[in-house]
Image (cartoon, rainbow, N blue to C red):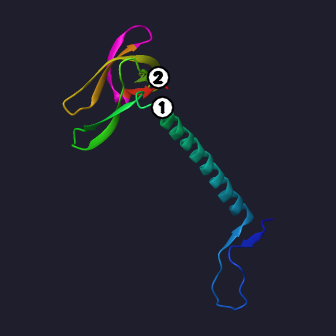
Amino acid sequence: ADITLSEQPQDDDEDGGDKPVRTRSEYIRQYESLTRAQSILKFVRDRIDDVKSMSASEIKVVRCKSPNGEVKTVPMYSKGTEVYYRSFNAAGEANLLKAIVVGSHQDNLLEPYYTIQMGDGREKQTDNDHLIFAP
């Protein structure tokens, strides 16, 4: 049987109002939810620390305009940077293939575009939407 725990101390005066109460299982669910949130927060903080520890020469960022006029900040990978190229097969499943940036340029909106060399030697033209930095 659940034990009912009062969220507020009991008053001696009767005001006729209902006091909020929580069951033990509700406290347990809330605790588990907070524990999961803390775990996710730790993971995110660790990834931020990983990025902060990279030297400035590893990843350059540039500001460019999207076709609708919004300004965004995106990475601009230099020649020799190892990346993962993300492609999708006919079933819509993502594939990550290791590649190396062999050239980069910017279009008229200053969006970076790349020539990458795949592991099998083929070269491809691509953009930031299909690349993931490989630290």
Provide residue 15's location: percent of width, then percent of height.
64, 90
Position of 70 with respect to 30 (left or right) is left
Residue lying at the far right of the rendered structure: 1
Residue 45 percent coordinates (x, y): 55, 43
Q: Position of residue 1 (x, y in %)?
A: 81, 65
Residue appearing at x 51%, y 34% in the figure: 53
The residue under the point 58% across, 41% down is 43
Mark 1 lies on a secondary structure that is loop
How would you rate the neighbour count of disc 2 (Cα within 10 Å): few for under 14, some for 14-19, many for 20 or more? few
Q: Quadrant of residue 23?
A: bottom right
Read off the magenta span: 118-129
Q: Amino acid at mark 2?
A: Asn
Foreground residue, 79 or 6? 79
Look at 65% across and 75% down and name the residue there: 20
Could you say where residue 120 lies in the image, as x and y percent from the top left?
43, 8
Q: With respect to residue 8, does 53 lie above or below?
A: above
Q: Is residue 92 visible?
A: no
Q: Does the magenta-highlighted stretch encompass residue 89?
A: no
Tell me the residue that label 1 is attached to. 54
Q: Is residue 11 above or below residue 88?
A: below
Residue located 63% across and 55% down the image: 34
The residue pinned by badge 2 equals 95
Marks 2 and 1, Cα distance to the nearest angstrom? Answer: 26 Å
- Tag 1 or tag 2, which sits nearer the N-term? 1
Q: Please indicate whether residue 60 sits to the left or right of residue 9 in the image.
A: left
Kindly indicate the quadrant of the structure image that contains residue 113: top left
Residue type at the position of mark 1? Met
